[in-house]
Image (tube, helix red, strand yellow):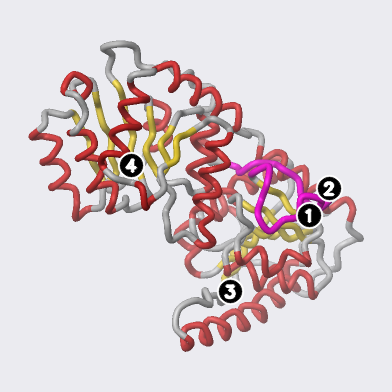
């Protein structure tokens, strides 16, 4: 019996786009459905489980910045469309799934030109710019939030499936949360992107130091810092006698998240999905320069579920954070309620739901064409 036609996963090169693609890839593989990744050269660093199948690299760029940069980016995207057209001709996929990012745009456009069944997955509470460019050509749109800006409420193509998370996160989904009782140690996890956040290194230590001494003595911190901030922040905590572990990156972040009584972080789609999957209370400070302010939309949706406290970047001061921390630590039941609300908002079966949509898309489509050449090695 011939092997089924592969499913093409088209994604940008950042972790927020690639992690959901990798989760879907694992689910498809478990179902005996082959897949292949189409991305730009940034995707080389995010191969992971996706590297088990051919990877096709295409030209891509973000049309932002100066006029010259935008023109060059448009030329690169044009070349990417040519790349993707030929790649899809060689692969002859059963379906194409786009995860956003400008690197996915040429592939999704080529899929529409070739008449291939295609769908989108949106990780944020705002449909990304890349996905907006190709939305009209998609037969289905999988969402991660109940309401997603730029998708009409009556759009029958849209279905809430959630944002797939990495397997190490999903494996911790049933880790119980125990709020810190009176006099008990309080574990705080701070992270803000792969290289940390400059404002976190400035505001958080000062907010911690402004707490009552009896409360400070109970704190134990794990904080992600930029390399240039490490020694200064370490010195602040050391002089105050606060137990703190600092690093630019934590390879075991899912375990750290599961061990935390409170998380302080940004509100990217992956962060929110991981907080929900494991079920941990959080104080979220949306990154103010995120495209279309999607992090604020993510945070507000999570806050509406009772899962977090939101402090906008403009309001992120020492006093504001200290007030929130003191209020939460003095009301452990509030932390427990937030943890339960976060866990209730989680969708640990998001990858399976997304794979179901892919299989439905394939079943509803006409037979795929014969490939013009073997996919063979990666392009």
Horizontal side of residue 268 vs 245, given as left or right? right
Q: How many residues crowd around disc 2 within 10 Å: few (fewer than 14), some, or many (20 or more)?
A: few
Q: Which residue: 51% across, 56% down? A: 47
What separation in Å lies between label 1 and label 2 (alpha carbons)?
A: 10 Å
Residue on which the image places disc 4: 250
Q: Main secondary structure of the magenta part?
A: loop
| Among the two numbered marks 1 and 2 on one chain, the one whose residue lies closer to the N terminus | 1
Tell me the element at label 3: loop
| Among the two numbered marks 3 and 1 on one chain, the one whose residue lies closer to the N terminus | 3
Residue on which the image places disc 2: 360
Q: Which residue: 64% across, 45% down? A: 144
Task: Indicate which label's residue lies in the foreground, 3 or 4.
Answer: 4
Residue 285 on the magenta span: no
Horizontal side of residue 300 vs 314, given as left or right? right
Give yes or no for contact between labels 3 and 1 (Cβ–Cβ under 8 Å): no
Q: How many residues crowd around disc 1 within 10 Å: few (fewer than 14), some, or many (20 or more)?
A: many
Residue on which the image places disc 3: 58
What separation in Å lies between label 4 and label 2 (alpha carbons)?
A: 38 Å
Residue on which the image places disc 1: 140
Q: Which residue: 70% across, 38% down? A: 352
What separation in Å lies between label 3 and label 1 (alpha carbons)?
A: 24 Å
What separation in Å lies between label 1 and label 4 (alpha carbons)?
A: 36 Å
Horizontal side of residue 366 vs 238, given as left or right? right
| Among the two numbered marks 3 and 2 on one chain, the one whose residue lies closer to the N terminus | 3
Task: Indicate which label's residue lies in the foreground, 1 or 2.
Answer: 1
Magenta residues?
145-164
């Amino acid at each position: 019996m011939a092997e089924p036609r592969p499913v093409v996963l088209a994604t940008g090169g950042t972790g927020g786009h690639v992690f959901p693609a990798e989760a879907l890839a694992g689910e498809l593989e478990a179902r005996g459905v082959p897949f292949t990744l189409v991305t730009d050269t940034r995707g080389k660093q995010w191969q992971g489980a996706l590297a088990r199948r051919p990877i096709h690299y295409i030209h891509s760029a973000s049309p932002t910045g100066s006029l010259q940069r935008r023109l060059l980016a448009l030329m690169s995207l044009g070349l990417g469309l040519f790349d993707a057209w030929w790649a899809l001709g060689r692969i002859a996929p059963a379906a194409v799934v786009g995860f956003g990012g400008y690197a996915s745009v040429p592939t999704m456009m080529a899929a529409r030109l070739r008449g291939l069944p295609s769908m989108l997955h949106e990780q944020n509470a705002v449909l990304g710019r890349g996905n907006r460019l190709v939305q009209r050509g998609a037969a289905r749109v999988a969402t991660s939030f109940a309401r997603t800006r730029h998708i009409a409420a009556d759009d029958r193509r849209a279905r809430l499936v959630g944002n797939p998370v990495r397997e190490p996160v999903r494996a911790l989904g049933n880790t119980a949360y125990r709020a810190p009782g009176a006099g008990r140690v309080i574990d705080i996890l701070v992270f803000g992107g792969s290289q940390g956040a400059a404002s976190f290194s400035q505001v958080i230590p000062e907010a911690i130091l402004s707490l009552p001494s009896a409360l400070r003595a109970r704190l134990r911190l794990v904080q992600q810092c930029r390399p240039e901030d490490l020694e200064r922040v370490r010195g602040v905590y050391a002089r105050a006698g606060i137990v703190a572990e600092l690093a630019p990156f934590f390879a075991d972040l899912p375990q750290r998240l599961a061990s935390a009584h409170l998380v302080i972080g940004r509100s990217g789609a992956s962060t929110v999905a991981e907080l929900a999957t494991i079920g941990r209370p959080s104080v979220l400070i949306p990154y103010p320069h995120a495209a279309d302010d999607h992090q604020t939309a993510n945070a507000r949706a999570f806050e509406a579920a009772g899962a977090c406290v939101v402090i906008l970047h403009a309001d992120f001061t020492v006093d504001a954070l200290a007030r929130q921390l003191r209020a939460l630590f003095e009301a452990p039941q509030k932390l427990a309620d937030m943890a339960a609300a976060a866990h209730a908002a989680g969708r640990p079966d998001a990858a399976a739901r997304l794979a179901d949509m892919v299989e439905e898309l394939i079943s509803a489509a006409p037979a795929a064409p014969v490939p013009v050449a073997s996919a063979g090695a990666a392009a």
